[in-house]
Amino acid sequence: MIKDPIKEISPGIFKIIHNTEELLVTLNLVPGRRVYNEQLFEMQGKEFRSWNPTRSKLAAAIIRGLKEIPIIPGNKILYLGVASGTTCSHISDVIGEKGYIWGVDFSARPIRDLIDNVSRYRKNIIPIFNDARLPSNYSMMVPLVDIVYVDVAQPDQAEIAIKNCNMFLKKRGYLMLAIKSRSIDVSKEPDEIYSSQIDILKKTNLEILEVIKLDPYEIDHAFILARKL
Ligand SMILES: C[S@@+](CC[C@H](N)C(=O)[O-])C[C@H]1O[C@@H](n2cnc3c(N)ncnc32)[C@H](O)[C@@H]1O
């Protein structure tokens, strides 16, 4: 019996078998267009984009066993540290035409690349050139959201996440936080850093649901899923 080569592991997120290898993919919202030279696959009349776990911490977290993937079609998402849109483009595939991502970054170059190569073609991404430490600067543009996604690689990233969750995350909404231990303190063990970040989040109205280490895809990184009480 031939096994179905496309398995939907969460709404809008799939695993396919390609040359005996299992790959994570999303359904391309803009058929024919690549974002970061990822592979495209035509299967069952649809086009899928490979989602590379060495380029995207969210893909690494899913492959490393994230149990609850809260991103679903139609979601509204605030993305802090969107950069040039690698991970954001896959989230854009998942949330589809009815969802929106407000993508914040304070570096001019990646935001320009996001606009030129990604958000121009993906109408569900709204780029915001601003500092995530100052959420009141963009509060006029961003509504209450289902998910706050944070990948800013800054020593105060937990505080940045909390500030933005307080302002924009709806009750029972999710925080997804990527932690790069070396950007917080190179002298400490990664596990010590992850615990200290978790302790900061726990002191607020956020409940920690899952903590996933991203090695070997991203060395000394972890991914936290939390929920607003
Ligand atoms: C690790 S990269 C993000 C990669 C991206 N999330 C992805 O997976 O495709 C971190 C980004 O956060 C941005 N960043 C760092 N601190 C920031 C801040 N305070 N406000 C806005 N952006 C920030 C940097 O400019 C950089 O583009």
Image (cartoon, helix red, strand yellow):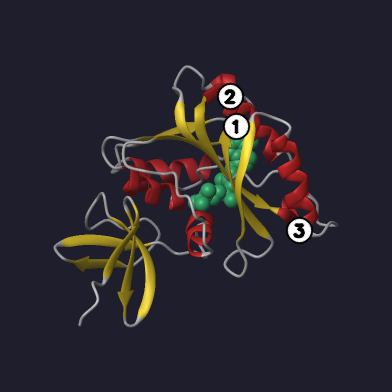
- To which residue does mark 1 refer? 132
User: Considering only vertical position in the picture, is 175 above or below 54?
Assistant: above
- To which residue does mark 3 refer? 190
In the current view of this chain or complex, which residue is farthest to the left?
45
Q: Earlier in the sequence, mark 1 or mark 3?
A: 1
Q: Which numbered disc, 1 or 3, marks the residue closer to the eye?
A: 3
- Of residue 47 and residue 211, the one placed in the foreground of this image is 211
Report x, y in % for residue 18: 31, 77
Q: Which numbered disc, 2 or 3, marks the residue closer to the eye?
A: 3
Do the residues bearing badges 1 and 2 touch, measured as CB atoms within 8 Å? yes
Residue type at mark 2 is Pro
User: Considering only vertical position in the picture, is 45 above or below 161?
Assistant: below
Q: Residue at x 32, y 49 (%)?
A: 93
**Ligand 1 closer than 8 Å to label 1 CB:** yes
Q: Can the viewer see residue 129 in this picture?
A: yes
Q: Residue at x 16, y 65 (%)?
A: 44
- To which residue does mark 2 refer? 135
Do the residues bearing badges 1 and 3 touch, measured as CB atoms within 8 Å? no
- SS at badge 2: helix
- Of residue 120 and residue 9, the one placed in the foreground of this image is 9
